[in-house]
Image (cartoon, rainbow, N blue to C red):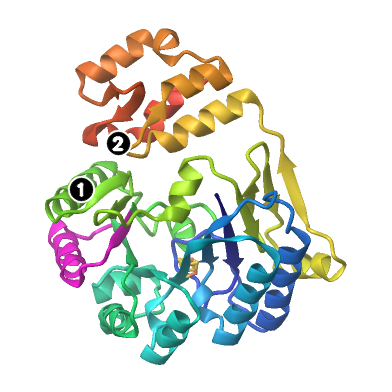
Amino acid sequence: MAGIYLHIPFCKQACYYCDFHFSTNQKYVNEMTEALCTELKLQNDYLQQEPINTIYFGGGTPSLLSKEHLKHVLDIIKANYRISKSPEITLEANPDDLTFDKLKSLYDLGINRLSIGIQSFNQEVLGFLNRAHNHEQALSCFQNARKAGFDNISIDLIYAIPADSHDNWQHDLDQALALKPEHISSYSLTIEPKTTFGNWLRKGNMPAIDEEFSASQFEILTERLTQAGYEQYEVSNFCKPGYYSRHNSGYWKQEKYLGIGPSAHSYDGVNRRFNISHNPKYMQALLESKIPYEEDILTAEDKINEYLLTTLRTKWGADLEKIKKEWKYDITSEHHAYLEQLFIKNYAVIEDNHLRLTRSGLLLADKISSDLFKV
Ligand code: SF4
């Protein structure tokens, strides 16, 4: 099974923390949609006819696309790829785009999962992040989505906002849980250099993220959501039983995926490709039937390290037998003393030949993975 990711590189305005690829100039939405469709046709053998199990509209802001644009893209996918019997079709959406009529049209197109960028229910926090939506829209979009028929909704929340309080974070979680979404993704705010926050930090107009504050908000998050019946199946992802994001789980399980659009990545089980992150150059290349990408030839070390980095963030953990068989890397003997320390500190366990991190280990997932890297 494989997945298709489509990057929609437009947003209404730039959130101050965001370093994804997007443009606030929406003049070329028609041309971009045509370019995406051309790339879909040109790439139709990339996944070697594997059935498509997931389609994911990400960005940027896919909810800016009209019903006609989305239908056109989905029709091209159906005409050029083998689709599995019940694919997961996700659309990332911003609350300010989600009127009832828009939601109904998305549902009628066959989109069966929404990932809504709520981020916070607190008006001050939304303003600080420069989000385009307000507190009322954060709530009404969800209620409208339910009325339109969506029964698989994920919401995004951000924590570790400077000068915020645990009370506000608890209140955000209260509001989120009251909506009963099937899935919640929650990330700590990070300050990336090429963003407004990065600029403020350099000029001393904003404090750095307080790691201890962030860690305690993460503790509150995991505690509250697990108590409410959500399963933490990845460091930042929680779901009601059975509602894993099939698309993201595919990334974490090293399944093949095709990324369409500027800045999108692809993986064919062997190498990775990266499309150019430049809207005009991307559209021009596609007009000439060329795909503007660079390719990374992955070494055995790259594959092992990527595998550790992604799987140790999940509840499934890293399959030690697979690593030994496929890449001749025996972690238990190479890192015997280090693993012993992880077990003593209750950061990790080995069960069924899988190395898994405990809840406290998950806080250090990236550090532990890199300590186990093959170099
Ligand atoms: S809407 Fe999403 S992609 Fe666009 S700027 Fe904000 S966070 Fe980034």
For the point 47% across and 13% down, which residue is it?
330
The percent coordinates of residue 191 (x first, y second) are 43, 53
Q: Residue at x 79, y 58 (%)?
A: 291
Residue 222, disc: 1
Q: How many marks?
A: 2
Q: Is residue 373 visible?
A: no
Return the residue nearer the eye: 13 or 156.
156
Element at label 2: helix
Q: Farthest residue in the front direction?
A: 85
Q: Earlier in the sequence, mark 2 or mark 1?
A: 1
Residue 41 vertical placement versus 136 (above, below) = above
Q: Tell me the residue at 75%/52% (across/down).
A: 293
> In the shown orientation, is residue 175 left or right of residue 242?
left
Instruction: Judge whether residue 304 is colored magenta.
Output: no
Q: Nearer the viewer, residue 365 or 43?
A: 43
Say the numbered circle drawn on residue 362: 2
Q: Position of residue 161 (x, y in %)?
A: 29, 58
Question: CB of mark 2 within 8 Å of CB of mark 1?
Answer: yes
- Give the residues drawn in magenta, as a range: 162-186
Check if residue 179 falls in the magenta segment.
yes
Q: Does dot 1 land on a helix, a strand or a loop?
A: helix
Amino acid at pointer 1: Thr
| Residue 284, placed above or below residue 100 | above
Name which quarter of the figure residue 184 lies in.
bottom left
Please, is residue 144 above or below residue 319 in the view?
below
